[in-house]
Image (spheres, rainbow, N blue to C red):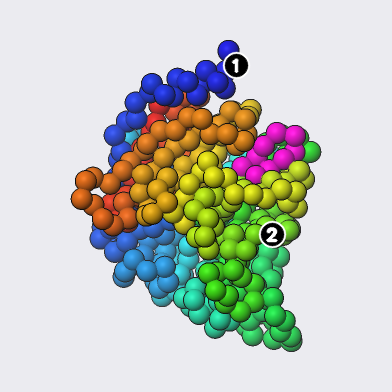
Amino acid sequence: MKFSLLFLLLLTAAQPFAQTIVFESGKEGHQSYRIPALLRLPNGNLLAFAEGRVQHAADFGDVNIVLKTSTDDGKSWSPLRVLVDNGSLQAGNCAPVLDQTDPRFPHGRIFLFYNTGNNHEGEVRKSLGYREVWYITSTDGGNQWSEPVNITAQVHRPNQPQVHAAYRFPDDWRSYANTPGHAIQIKHGKFKGRIYVAANHSAGAPQPKFEEYRAHGFYSDDHGQTFHLSQDVPIKGSNEAMAVELSRNHLMLNIRNQQGDVRARIVALSTDGGATWDTTYFDRNLPDPVCQGSILRIGKKTLAFCNNASTSRRDELTLRFSSDEGRSWPISRLIDKAPAGYTSDYTAYSDLALLSKHRIGVLYERDNYRQIVFKPVD
């Protein structure tokens, strides 16, 4: 029996550990925590990132990027640290990734990509504000971080007076957001070493049912010195996305359908490391209530995927496994579900990290956004 299939079969009998609260609303200086991202380092340490919303739970406002660290596989977590504070404005949509191929940093360098903005998303869609793209780095496992680097001009096509005053055109990019969740570094093949960040943008004036949104990606082949934009995913309303490396120089984006007309995930496949898209389709084996999802490569052709499996509301967080690079998803595990009588969103955004050969860590929003919790799954 192939290892990947045996691994999947073992999962059906495995039992998850109890979850640990990592971030909790109203504590450690923030009224709400949203949008988790998870990164595991080679020494086993876990870095849990989130948006710390100071005054309320809304997307826009005084929003910081915060970090907690675990040195014991998620059983306990360090005190909260604020990594990015954009004053009274927002900093969020963090996308961490570890660059392990830069000879200048033999122990690796963490990139943390994030966005800032000066107005609500709805106003930015009307061209009444702008969004920018930045990164900071760490070469000591997340203890110390560099000064921020603004890469907006390379990875965004903004048309705001503050950025490009000379001209206007009808399909200018307006709203913009990274993944959310982890970014990736390609580990094999022709594009080995490529840092890849899934993202999305709105193009032109607001359209009904968010039709002006498109998913895309941006990437660097020189360890963050320069960046390049991918082709847009050619499906209207394609929105929050996450990338995963496949075999044979292929790459997949797994994408939220913001229109909500099809309650399933959008998939875009690339044969050139995520620069262009050869195939796009709705994967009806992955139902979705219009929310974020997370995907992770855990073996040669084995993928894990996590999202809310309900099509009516954000609930029934489910972890699925594929041994054929996402063509089918035969194994599923329910991670968390609302108790009887609960009528609000229960689970929402999540991110994944491989803890060991036989254990995956799930960092996810729980209890109507009151908590971000970590659960290791054997």
Residue 249 magenta: yes
Q: 302 above or below 5?
A: below
The residue sitting at 72% across, 40% down in the picture is 250
How far apart, in angstroms, are the residues tagged by discs 1 and 2? 36 Å
Q: Which mark is on residue 234?
A: 2
Residue 101 appears at what percent x and percent y? 68, 39
Residue 6 appears at what percent x and percent y? 52, 18
Q: Is residue 55 left or right of residue 107?
A: left
- The amino acid sitting under disc 2 is Pro
Residue 283 lies in what quarter of the image? top right
Residue range in magenta is: 244-252
Q: Secondary structure at mark 2?
A: loop
Q: 287 above or below 327?
A: below
The residue sitting at 53% across, 69% down in the picture is 209
Looking at this view, is 219 or 216 the one in front?
216
Residue that carries the numbered disc 1 in the rendered image: 2
